Image (cartoon, rainbow, N blue to C red):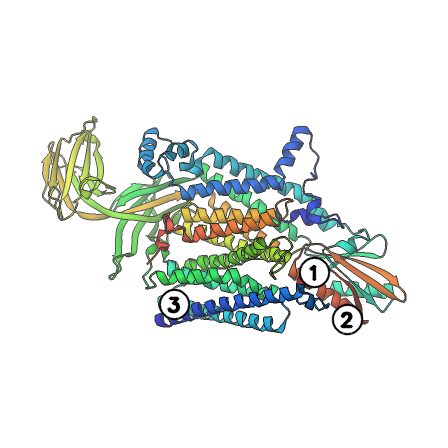
Amino acid sequence: MADQARTRPVPGVPPADALEEVPLIDVDGALERLWSVLTSMRLALVLILVLAALALAGTILVQAPPGVAADPEARAEWLNQVRPKYGGWTGVFDALGLFAVFESIWFRLVAAALTASTLACSIRRLPGIVMTATRPHVDVAEAFFEHAPHREAVILREGPTAARQRVEATLRGHRYRIIAGSDGATLYADRFRWVPLAGLVGHLALVVIVVGALVGATFGFRDPDFVIAEGSTAAVPGTPGLSVELVSFRDSYYANTGAPSDYASELVLYRDGAEVARQTVRVNDPLRYDGTSFYQSFYGPAASVRVADEAGTLLFAGGVPLAWSMNEGNRRVGTFTIPERDLTVWVVGTGGPSDLVVRPGQMRVEVYRNDGSATPVDAVSLDPNKPAVIEGLSFTFDRELQFSGLSIARDPGTPIVWLGCTLLFFGFVIRFTVPHRRIWIRISRQGGHSRVAFASVGRGDVSLGAEYARLIEEVGRGPAATDIARGRAATRA
Amino acid sequence: MYKLSEYAFVAGGLSAILALITSVAYAASGLRAARLQTSPAAMTGRTIGFSAGPRTASIGLYATLLAWLAAAALTASLVFRTFATGHGPFANMYEFSVAFAWGILVAYLWFERRYHQRLLALVALPVAIALMAYATTIPSTIEPLVPALQNNLLLTVHVAVAIVAYGSFTVAFAAAILYLVQPEGGRWGLPKPGVLDEIGYRSIVVGFPFLTLTIVLGAVWADIAWGRYWSWDPKETASFVTWLIYGAYLHARVVRGWRGTWAAALLLLGFAATLFTYFGNLFFGGLHSYAGLG
């Protein structure tokens, strides 16, 4: 919206003020008022600042993890965690939604209002921009040549007709379009007349980005915490028919600092059992297949476990990711179920060298009945390849594996967002770097010579001022001209 | 290479300090010229403008040369560091601070050349020097990159673009400060408010698209590395806040009642947001936390 109020100034009046609050399209009553509110740049300005304040709150205050706000129990627990930090303000911030700013009604309202305002402003400006480009205001009052932000006049030692030809030739040489005024003495010249549209495109790009975000939120799918152990195959959540296998996982570390240098998952994708994609996925190298992307996110230990019944039939065999941490003893845990016996098994890794219950190299299985009971039926710490019998089932811990934590996402809004970003960037760059050049020229007879007055709009733009100065100099170069009135171009200020 | 980078950094810092001292001397000599102008002895029709007066000009020239020297030394420091590390000099707080100082010097010199306003140095150079001083307090050792940063192209471009934006914003900040400290009418030989307003605007016109590009490239990288283009990570949110404030500024300049002082105030606010974004990862954690110290 910046500066676009200036696209069609009333010459002689400071242009930006002139059109600021004038609606170009007439709508009735309330609608008209709504329209004038929406298209008010003052409102847009306030909305931008309010949005900035809300977003700032979102960076300064700790934000609750996703899902916490909707679950009253988790929310109360989370609030108790942050209460020491914010004291009496905790309740106030929570009531205002400031712990989940970006999901709050305030943020959404302001963002929606700003989007509507952007859209309305763009619609309002469009006719003016088209008008300025196609049917510009050519005939201007004499006063314009005395008050315009850029103005200058030269005397040429030749008659008005020759002077006019000279001016036109010079401007054409610089690729200006020239339109003659009805009085025969005024010329209008402009260049890059469609550039103001770039500013409009830059603004509409914001609406495009918002649309992309909404499309993603509505039709997209995301599982940031998908875990899979080496050697396992699992259905890809949210994508029927697709399954993923983690063939192997590798991690390496810098010798001197111990910081991770690389971690990578070799993934194979199957659609209805047939392999469709295979890639080693790294942090900066996701696997993308048919709109679904697999990102390397985190990793940890897993246990290869087998469970067989009395007859030796395998009820479970595979890697169990130890994806959670237990506060007690610093142990990592994972879980799987045995539906045939209505049992849930927790697999507990060692807490380290000082752990006497689950010694290093061991893996503990705790077997629970699915009846809500909090005490296990039995629990045994297993050494590798030494089965133990619990509830008549034989549990074997084969060896330790690794699991990979993947972020799986399908976001159909992303291409729309990239389109919006591209339009946004190039729209603004063009708008800011290629100003619409507009010059009004009036040629009058002065004795045997002619006086050529130039005037232009656009406050204090140095490069523009310099370009006009060059043009005028070029006009005057032929028949030794005299400058008689220099404008207050910013270059000389 | 590492040693050379350190030497060049020290040379850059010293040059910047000398440039600042010279600029202050230049400003002071300008003040005297301005006073002369109002004293009866000088009221003889010969105007002594701020940029006029042979002595003032020569001091100013030294100030500019020293600033160029500082920029050249920092450029060398960053280039040597790039050779030493094998990636763009933007991977930790030390490298980023030096680069930020470099961005300020370059943006300042660019605008100084274009608008002939040396006094912007009075604000811009202290900011650059403060960043260099800050850089000396944090370890400059070269650490290998964690996997998330192992994207040489995006690391280099994303941050290099941010440096240009931040440098421009510092010039805008300088212009806004000089604009706001001037009493109505009285100028102490400072640049005219109209010129400062124009410089502030032009530097945002440069910086804003670069900040936009920084955020967009950040989103592209986030989509590759984190699996989503936007996750309201504190640092990306802070840069969004900065973007909004400068966006507000661009609108404020064409809204009646917001021009001048209020627009300049928005430039201060925007620069505060820039610094918040810059130093943010020191206290708000988040996905950018690896860009921290060490």
Q: Residues within 10 Å of mark 2 (few under 14, many from 20)?
A: few
The disc placed on residue B81 is 3
Q: Secondary structure at mark 2?
A: helix
The answer to whether any part of residue A211 appears in the image is no
Left or right of B61 on screen, residue A334 = left
Q: CA distance from mark 1 to mark 3?
A: 44 Å
Are the residues under badges 1 and 3 in a single subunit? no
Give the labeled residue for mark 2. A477
Amino acid carrying label 2: it is: Arg
Are the residues under badges 1 and 2 in a single subunit? yes
User: For the point 49% across and 67% down, which residue is it?
Assistant: B21
Q: CA distance from mark 3 to mark 2?
A: 52 Å
> The residue marked by circle 3 belongs to what chain?
B
The disc placed on residue A489 is 1
> The residue marked by circle 2 belongs to what chain?
A
The answer to whether any part of residue A66 appears in the image is yes
Amino acid carrying label 3: it is: Arg
> Which residue is more in the foreground, B125 or A485?
B125
Q: Closer to the observer: label 1 or label 2?
A: 1
Numbered disc total: 3
Q: Residues within 10 Å of mark 1 (few under 14, many from 20)?
A: many
Q: Residues within 10 Å of mark 3 (few under 14, many from 20)?
A: many
User: For the point 13% across and 41% down, which residue is it?
Assistant: A396
Q: Residue furthest front?
A: B40
Are the residues under badges 3 and 2 in a single subunit? no
- Residue B248 versus residue A471 in the image, above or below: above
Q: Are marks 1 and 3 in contact (CB under 8 Å)?
A: no
